[in-house]
């Protein structure tokens, strides 16, 4: 057979998908484990989501246009109570840290620990291509799996979210309803690989990266994310999807009330409420305050900022991912040995 | 003439200690080179630099006919068998072969399979379940399947029992005879050298102490036996590697390429390679490279 070879003599090309096959072979059991967990979660979410939808129809929530009337208010509380407690789903918050640490930490560290890097990095393909292929393939799989988790949860939670109209940062809606979930996973993954290359210890890399990324994500969710943008301030009511970050009271003289004065005010409001069982029109706190010329000042992020926040978080994390990835490739290429 | 390994001013520092210092050598291709020295002499460092696993602190090293160590061209032409084989223990032998095939431009799968069949190593068996001897045979098979120009082995015999050692060296020699591949292997087992090496590099304390063709080295060294009271006078005329005196007799291992230079009243005996290497290992200060009276010729090749 005579084939024209455009390549220089003696230098055949590398096998197509060579490193890809090696990556697959080395990590396929981890991949099956990942898929197994995802399948279990999917089964849970699909079953729960279907039942939620039938409950939604059984309650007749489809006929509620808004939820201002008493009847619809009661129905939506019923649906809310039907949903299991949200607390177990908080494990989803830690999923990116877990996936990232457990897949990223050992990736190079295990090769360094067992000495197999001396085999892997002396083959014709070279270590730069080896690490790049591995990083990109595993990152792609992790991102897809994380996005699948997000989609499943969002679908499962959609009926509740539809009737409750949570603020956009509540009930994992921000974590799982946009693009940040896979990005957080990739951040933990790239940090794991980097830490593994740096420390050359699998356990150290997995442990520190899991703790550090969990801490970072929890801090973001509960403390830091609200500072991505300056909140708007209104004396009126906020919309259903707005994310309320703070409320304060202004007294009739225009002074902002401190926390203790605020509590005092609320105690007064409770004291004047009719005794339980005593029929009578109860007045809402807001109306009660307005009648006394107090104003409620609400700091909030309007619902339209959902995607802005998503892109801010995905943006700085992507930058960090890129830096960690480059540092890892550089360390593997230059520094080790 | 093409070189197997060629280093100039090569040095490697880890933290504050120099594992290898000021190493210059040119090992011609087509040899089986034994790299010997005590533990910590810098053998593994030199080999790591040659296969591109480490980057030099100073100088440079070229392999397989002048390719910069660690470059793509060098990785194609050089095969490496690391200490303790360094294979993926959880994978079956067949998958190790496929990994090798996936990561290399040149790969002789048929021959690798035939070799394993010949050795009676079942391809479905996991690497970790093999004996130490079988594991190093698999590592050698993987290295040879690359069809390298230069095969570098780091302490291939260290973990093997005498039988496995013998089998491994036999397999290695067969491959050399078949392919004409250049081989550099490190070892602290001096006894193996004489049978298999035709070129020797002795290292000590991060420096190269002796380097040369085995035949030339043996021809260039002699044991002179004579009266102890005149030993000092003889020792002044020749570079002495080893000086042993017992009662009235002195045994001097000297370096000289001149066979007629035996002083009157002294006897000259040839020296074996193993004895020669051991003598150098025992005398770190002695060196073929920069002794008091350097022998011509050798200086050009190694320093």
Image (cartoon, grey):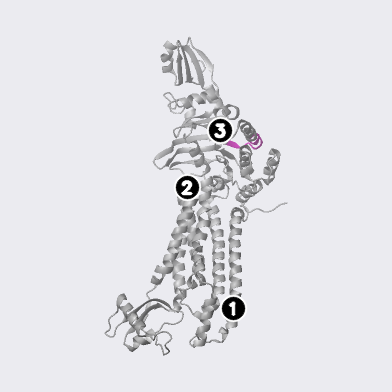
Which disc number belongs to residue A165? Answer: none
| A151 sits left or right of A280 in the view | right
Q: CA distance from mark 2 to mark 1?
A: 55 Å
Of the pair B137 and B177, the residue shown nearer to us: B137
Q: CA distance from mark 1 to mark 3?
A: 76 Å
* Subunit bearing disc 2: A
Residue at image coords 58%, 33%: B31
Residue A324 visible somewhere in the drawing: no
**Mark toward the viewer: 1 or 3:** 1
2 or 1: tag closer to the N-terminus:
1
Q: Is residue B185 magenta?
A: yes
* Same-subunit check for callouts 2 and 3: no
Residue at image coords 51%, 46%: A113
x then y, percent, for residue B152: 56, 39
Check disc 3 and report the residue beneath it: B33
Q: Is residue A77 above or below residue B161?
A: below
Of the pair A59 and A248, the residue shown nearer to us: A59
Q: Is residue A88 above or below residue B101?
A: below
x then y, percent, for residue A4: 67, 54
Which disc number belongs to residue A336? Answer: 2
> Which region is colored magenta?
B174-187
* Subunit bearing disc 3: B
Of the pair B156 and A233, the residue shown nearer to us: A233
x then y, percent, for residue B151: 58, 39
Q: Is residue A205 above or below residue B68?
A: below
**Mark toward the viewer: 2 or 3:** 2
Residue at image coords 53%, 48%: A111
Tell me the element at label 1: helix
Categorize mark 1 by other alpha carbons within 10 Å: few (<14), some (14-19), many (20+): some
Check disc 1 and report the residue beneath it: A53
Toward which corner of the image does residue A263 lie, by quadrant?
A: bottom left
* Subunit bearing disc 1: A
């Amino acid at each position: 057979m005579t084939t024209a070879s455009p390549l220089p003599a003696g230098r055949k090309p590398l096998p197509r998908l060579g490193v890809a096959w090696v990556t697959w072979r080395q990590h396929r059991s981890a991949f099956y484990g990942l898929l197994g967990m995802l399948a279990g979660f999917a089964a849970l979410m699909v079953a729960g989501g279907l039942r939620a939808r039938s409950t939604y129809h059984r309650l007749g929530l489809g006929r509620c246009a808004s939820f201002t009337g008493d009847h619809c208010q009661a129905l939506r509380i019923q649906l809310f109570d039907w949903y299991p407690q949200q607390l177990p789903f908080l494990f989803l918050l830690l999923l990116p840290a877990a996936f990232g640490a457990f897949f990223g930490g050992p990736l190079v560290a295990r090769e360094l620990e067992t000495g197999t890097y001396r085999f892997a990095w002396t083959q014709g393909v070279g270590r730069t291509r080896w690490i790049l292929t591995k990083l990109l393939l595993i990152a792609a799989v992790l991102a897809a799996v994380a996005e699948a988790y997000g989609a499943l949860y969002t679908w499962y939670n959609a009926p509740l979210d539809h009737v409750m109209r949570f603020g956009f940062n509540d009930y994992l809606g921000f974590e799982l309803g946009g693009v940040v979930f896979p990005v957080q996973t990739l951040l933990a993954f790239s940090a794991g690989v980097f830490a593994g290359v740096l420390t050359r210890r699998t356990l150290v890399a997995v442990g520190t990266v899991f703790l550090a990324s969990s801490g970072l994500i929890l801090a973001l969710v509960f403390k830091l994310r609200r500072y991505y943008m300056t909140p708007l301030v209104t004396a009126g009511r906020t919309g259903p999807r707005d994310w309320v970050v703070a409320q304060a009271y202004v007294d009739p003289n225009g002074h902002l009330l401190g926390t203790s004065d605020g509590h005092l005010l609320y105690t007064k409001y409770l004291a004047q409420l009719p005794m339980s069982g005593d029929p009578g029109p109860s007045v809402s706190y807001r109306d009660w305050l307005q009648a006394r010329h107090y104003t409620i000042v609400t700091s909030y992020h309007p619902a339209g900022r959902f995607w802005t926040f998503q892109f801010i978080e995905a943006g700085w994390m992507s930058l960090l991912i890129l830096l960690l990835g480059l540092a890892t490739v550089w360390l593997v290429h230059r520094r080790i040995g | 003439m093409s070189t197997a390994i060629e280093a100039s001013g090569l040095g490697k520092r880890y933290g504050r200690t120099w594992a290898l210092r000021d190493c210059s050598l040119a090992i011609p291709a087509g040899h089986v080179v034994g790299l010997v020295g005590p533990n910590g002499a810098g053998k593994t460092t030199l080999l790591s630099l040659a296969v591109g696993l480490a980057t030099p602190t100073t100088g440079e090293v070229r392999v397989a006919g002048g390719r910069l160590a660690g470059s793509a061209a060098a990785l194609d032409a050089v095969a490496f068998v690391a200490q303790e084989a360094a294979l993926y223990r959880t994978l079956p032998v067949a998958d190790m072969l496929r990994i090798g095939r996936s990561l290399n431009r040149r790969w002789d799968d048929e021959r690798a399979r035939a070799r394993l069949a010949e050795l009676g190593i079942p391809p479905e068996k996991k690497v970790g379940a093999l004996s130490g001897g079988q594991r190093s045979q698999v590592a050698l098979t993987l290295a040879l399947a690359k069809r390298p120009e230069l095969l570098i082995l780091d302490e291939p015999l260290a973990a093997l029992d005498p039988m496995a050692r013998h089998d491994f060296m036999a397999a290695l020699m067969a491959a050399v005879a078949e392919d004409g591949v250049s081989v550099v292997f490190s070892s602290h087992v001096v006894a193996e050298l004489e049978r298999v090496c035709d070129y020797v590099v002795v290292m000590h304390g991060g420096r190269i102490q002796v380097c040369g063709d085995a035949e030339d080295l043996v021809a260039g060294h002699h044991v002179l036996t004579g009266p102890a009271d005149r030993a000092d006078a003889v020792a002044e005329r020749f570079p002495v590697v080893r000086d042993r005196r017992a009662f009235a007799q002195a045994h001097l291992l000297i370096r000289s390429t001149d066979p007629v230079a035996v002083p009157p009243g002294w006897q000259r005996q040839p020296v074996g390679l193993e004895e020669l290497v051991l003598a150098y290992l025992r005398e770190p200060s002695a060196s073929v490279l920069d002794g008091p009276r350097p022998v011509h010729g050798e200086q050009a090749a190694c320093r």
